[in-house]
Image (cartoon, grey):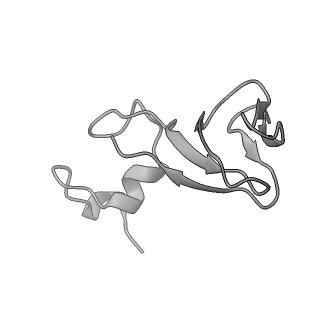
């Protein structure tokens, strides 16, 4: 168990930084990201924002890739994704 008094403030553990609010981290960073989503029907890759507020459709077969859920977008069952590199 890690106590708050036992933490090195200059280099805090990564798991502790992930749980903090995005503005209270040592280096501020957003929670959102872009990702490549592969369609389960035609295997076409589409770039999608992780917190998209609209339904995203596949460009070639018009299948639903993700739907908004208030915060992060919910991927359709069977779709695979990978986080885009910065």
Residue 12 in the image: state x and y as whole percent.
Answer: 26, 56
Above or below, 53 against 8 in this view is above
Q: Point out the residue furthest to the left here.
A: 10
Q: Is 6 left, or right, of 51 in this rendering? A: left
Q: Quadrant of the C terminus?
A: top left
Above or below, 64 against 76 in this view is above
- Figure quadrant of residue 28: top left
Q: Point out the residue furthest to the bottom here.
A: 1
Residue 3 in the image: state x and y as whole percent.
Answer: 37, 65
At x 36% / y 46%, what residue is drawn?
Answer: 85
At x 70% / y 34%, what residue is drawn?
Answer: 71
Q: Is 23 left, or right, of 50 in this rendering? A: left
* 19 and 78: which is toward the camera: 78
- Figure quadrant of residue 27: top left
Residue 76 in the image: state x and y as whole percent.
Answer: 80, 50
Q: Is 78 left, or right, of 80 in this rendering? A: right
At x 73% / y 56%, what residue is drawn?
Answer: 79
Q: Total number of numbered labels? A: 0
Q: Point out the residue furthest to the top here.
A: 54
Q: Is 71 left, or right, of 61 in this rendering? A: left
* 73 and 1: which is toward the camera: 73
* 79 and 3: which is toward the camera: 79
At x 84% / y 42%, what residue is drawn?
Answer: 63
Residue 37 in the image: state x and y as whole percent.
Answer: 62, 48
Q: Quadrant of the N terminus?
A: bottom left
């Amino acid at each position: 168990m890690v106590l708050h008094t036992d933490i090195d403030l200059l280099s805090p553990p990564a798991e502790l930084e992930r749980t903090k609010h995005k503005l209270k981290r040592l280096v501020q960073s957003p929670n959102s990201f872009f990702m490549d989503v592969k369609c389960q029907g035609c295997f076409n890759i589409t770039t999608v924002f992780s917190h998209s507020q609209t339904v995203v459709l596949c460009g070639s077969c018009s299948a639903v890739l993700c739907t908004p859920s208030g915060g992060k977008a919910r991927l359709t069952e069977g779709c695979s994704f990978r986080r885009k590199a910065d």
